Amino acid sequence: MENKTPLDLKATVNLPKTNFSQKANLTQREPERLARWKQMDLYHQICQARKGRPTFLLHDGPPYANADIHIGTAMNKILKDFIVKSHSMMGYDAPYVPGYDCHGLPIELFVDKKLGAKKSQMSPVSIRKACREHAAQALKRQTRDFQRLGVLGEWENPYLTMSNAYEAETARLFGRFVGRGYVYKGARPVYWCIHDQTALAEAEVEYKEHASPSIYVKFPFPEDQVRELEKRIADLRNADLREPSDQSAIRNPQSAFGKPVFVLIWTTTPWTLPANLGIAVNPNFDYSAIDVGEELYIVARDLVDAVAEKCGLEPPRIVATFPGSALDGLEARHAWIDRPSLLMVGEHVTLGGEADAETEIDVAFAQKKGSGKAGTGCVHTAPGHGHDDFVIGQQYRDQLAAVYDRLREAGVLGGQMKGAEVYCPVDNAGRFTSEVEHFAGQSVFEANEQIVEFLRANGALVFTEEYPHRYPHCWRCHNPVIFRATPQWFISMDRSTDGGPGLRAAALREVERVTWMPAWGRDRMRNMLKGRPDWCVSRQRVWGVPIPAFYCAGCGETIADEKVIDHVSSIFAKETADAWYAREAEYLLPDGFGCPKCDGSTFTKETDILDVWFDSGSSSIAVLVAERHLQWPADVYIEGPDQHRGWFNSSLMVGLAARDEAPYKTVITHGWTVDGEGKAMHKSTGNAIPADEVVSKQGAEIMRLWVASSDYTEDVRVSPEILTRMVDAYRKLRNTARYALGNISDFDPETDAVADGELWEIDRWALAVTREVTRKAVDSYKRFDYTTVYHALYNYATVTLSNVYIDILKDRLYTFAPKSVGRRSAQTALFQIVDAFARLLAPVLCFTADEIWENLPGKHEASIHLAEFRDGEPLEDDAVLLERWNDRDKGILSVRSIVQQHLEVARNQKVIGASLEARVTLTLGPDLYPIFKEIEEMLTSIFIVSQVEVVEGSEGLAVKVEHARGAKCERCWNWSETVGQDPGFPTIDARCVRQLEEGWGL
Ligand SMILES: [Zn+2]
Ligand SMILES: [Zn+2]
Ligand SMILES: [Zn+2]
């Protein structure tokens, strides 16, 4: 014993050892790991591993293959990756087929610009080729950037809306709409951009503040019509006399109309006045004739005072009041054009707010602004320039027939079919056509002012002012759009020829069945569907899927037939839709096809293409069913808040036409990305944070952690400060993993693990907490609630592990004999902890979790993404352990924090320095005493002090801190009265002597 070999005590301390470095070096390591994943074909290995399991399908909404990705696109893809990776780790077969939206105006415009004058000499096929190349280049860059974010999927084989198969399926699905009787061709007012000269879909307009001239205009009400109105009022009065009732509604009718009478209309689009064919009133409102001096005006009774005040009229005298229905079918005269303006009744007429309902689809705003009453209750109606106007014009088609006949004679209806005319004297460029007297050739927005001046000059203008309101603008060029009737292809929202409900009714039914997250998605969808007009699906462009319709050269018959379209689709499948432009009609039609009307055999082709929303809306069928044979409907769609009118809507329509069902079970909406103050980000304002900059400076993991930490159900803030906070958070998570890994480098779970029942109590407690965290995190992953995942894992790492468990464990891990049961017990727990932690982190920190995995001892899958979440089911005594340790009042950890406070005081009073210099005396009442007496020996490590004595007191809890007795052990730094007792090791305590004997055989 005397002759011990001189021992380097430091070498007997088990210091942490791991290849998992402290410095993350993400910008270098992430690309290396991506290369490895690619080399091992990780995505397909995962598919293989999950084969035969229940499927969980997220269907990717295709980003537009035009520009490079921005931080919002990055967030969208990362959220999708969270969903796919987490469900894969729940054991689902969760394939991810990314897609790209490749057709459409932005690409065609870009190519237009690039080709310049050359374009006019190019064939549609060459233009399409240029567009195809542009899209292919853009999607290649996007693919590179999405992969760089760590998103796993079918990147070598994404779905493209411009592929043969997809174009063929899009055409075929249009044929399905035709076959079910939903499609018709007609002139209808649609959003029209006069700058880009194309029709726009609902989803392609954005609402912005816009100042329009608000005008109050007099429409003469001729003598004979006044007489007729008087007669109707008298009849109403007689009817009323039979049942005594309120007589005040009809006053003095005979003598009242002694002066010239006018119907007073209000509009904010003076340029639509040349197309005026009528005035709409609400049949259920009362209207009054008011005497304003020389003239009488007819306005809604409830607006009399507001109109008089607004127009600066003498305080008006009401000379007669009558229901709006009394005006039905009477004819006023146009304010300056020699033709009648038909009085029509419609319930769309409101008292105030916006005259043109279609410019105020943004209901919330209209309701806010609508509180101040504007208008007259007599709505100027131009069926060629508004949705409601068009609808009411259809209802009064018989009464308007004579007007249309005269317009036809004047040659201003073009080739429109009799009975289906819509009057719209504005051309593609937004200029009045030649028959519009005084204003021919003027652009409509410039004409506004001229028309107001003209009305003023001829005495028809009562009042005008500037009127700020929300007005639709083109999403592409940001210019205000107009409503304009043009011949277009439409999908009817309400028509059905096969006995089923129309699309609107079916869509409203499905909306109730789908789960919407957040729940307001359902209301938004419902409101949008209730109010939306028929879907205008034609575009006067080249880059898209052509509408596969033909026209008979002999008789003009339109051929839109599902069987013919199926035939065309089979040609697209081989040659892409370019065939429409490269081939003659005869080639595209089935052999021997003859016109069903005249049996002619010469045909021309439709030149319009389909709305791109039709393309992307076809994706669930084209991709999940036709191309990849996956599950339909999809489990989940997740996109930004602009997709209710866009992709969520068009997908629903195609799903219904093809399979009478919504293509999704759950629809999640995420917010926009905004700057640190909540403002929209723009390159021009300098507050934009480019996605590639974050990735190249901080790493994709930081961006992923930011997405997880943010509540995506609202707008998501991002700023350099926020990202710096994420770097700190990342570092803490990484260091926790690193510490755990460092202390199990000499542990083999196969041979060294301690059985559950033999683990030390604190180790069993740490595992019970781990199971609790696993349950919470997995449950949150199921609910797509990544913020809760983030907070649960962050607290687990920084509080439970770092501040408590690991802190307590250090002494045991460092100073116990390497293979001692005590140290192996701690390692067994740490191994399971880091294993569970890495799995739970993997969907979010996909690179770092895989790196942890690589450094984890024992046999396991080649990548963490092949692994699954651990079962978090609690063991039998978990509940007891959690209460014993975590109880707020009596729990061991709450006593620990009280002791720590006392230690802090003692440190400040210089009683002790490090906590190991302390001796703690706990005096406990009868409820706590037995608990703590039993674990008295454990308490030194739990409190991280050298000596603890538990004493029974009368009540409560008292803590006394003094300096520890004895001397400081050179090896473990604990103070002990045993230091110096062993002459062989004069500088260390008895505990260390025992460990040296066990561990090093000394
Ligand atoms: Zn435009
Ligand atoms: Zn024919
Ligand atoms: Zn010691």
Image: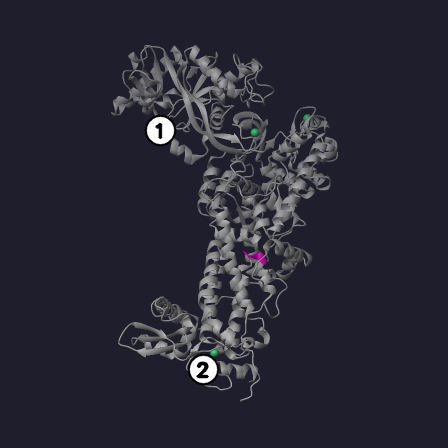
Pick whichever, 110 or 438, lies toward us.
110
Where is residue 954? Give x, y as percent: 26, 76
Where is residue 653? Give x, y as percent: 55, 40
Pick whichever, 192 or 115, lies toward us.
115
Beta carbon at label 1 within 8 Å of ligand 1: no
Q: Which residue is mark 1?
A: 372
309 versus 612 height, above or below = above
Q: Which residues are magenta?
A: 843-847
> Could one spot residue 92 in this view of the protein?
no
Mark 1 residue element: loop
Q: Which residue is mark 2?
A: 979
Where is residue 984? Give x, y as percent: 51, 86
| Residue ranking furthest to the bottom | 1
How busy is the neighbourhood of tag 2: few (under 14 within 10 Å), some, or many (20 plus)?
A: many
Q: Is residue 846 magenta?
A: yes
Q: Judge from the rendering whether residue 336 lies leftward or rightward of residue 440; answer left or right.
A: left
- Checking the image for residue 946, the label placed there is none
Distance between the alpha carbons at the discs numbered 2 and 1: 88 Å
Amino acid on which disc 1 is placed: Gly
Q: For ligand 2, which image quadrant applies?
A: top right
How busy is the neighbourhood of tag 1: few (under 14 within 10 Å), some, or many (20 plus)?
A: few
- Our reading of the magenta stretch's main secondary structure is loop
Pick whichever, 849 or 420, lies toward us.
849
Beta carbon at label 2 within 8 Å of ligand 3: yes
Amino acid on which disc 2 is placed: Val
**Disc nearest the viewer among 2 and 1:** 2
Q: How are the colours assigned in the image? A: one colour
Where is residue 629? Give x, y as percent: 64, 51
Q: Earlier in the sequence, mark 2 or mark 1?
A: 1
Q: Quadrant of the C terminus?
A: bottom right
108 versus 733 height, above or below = above
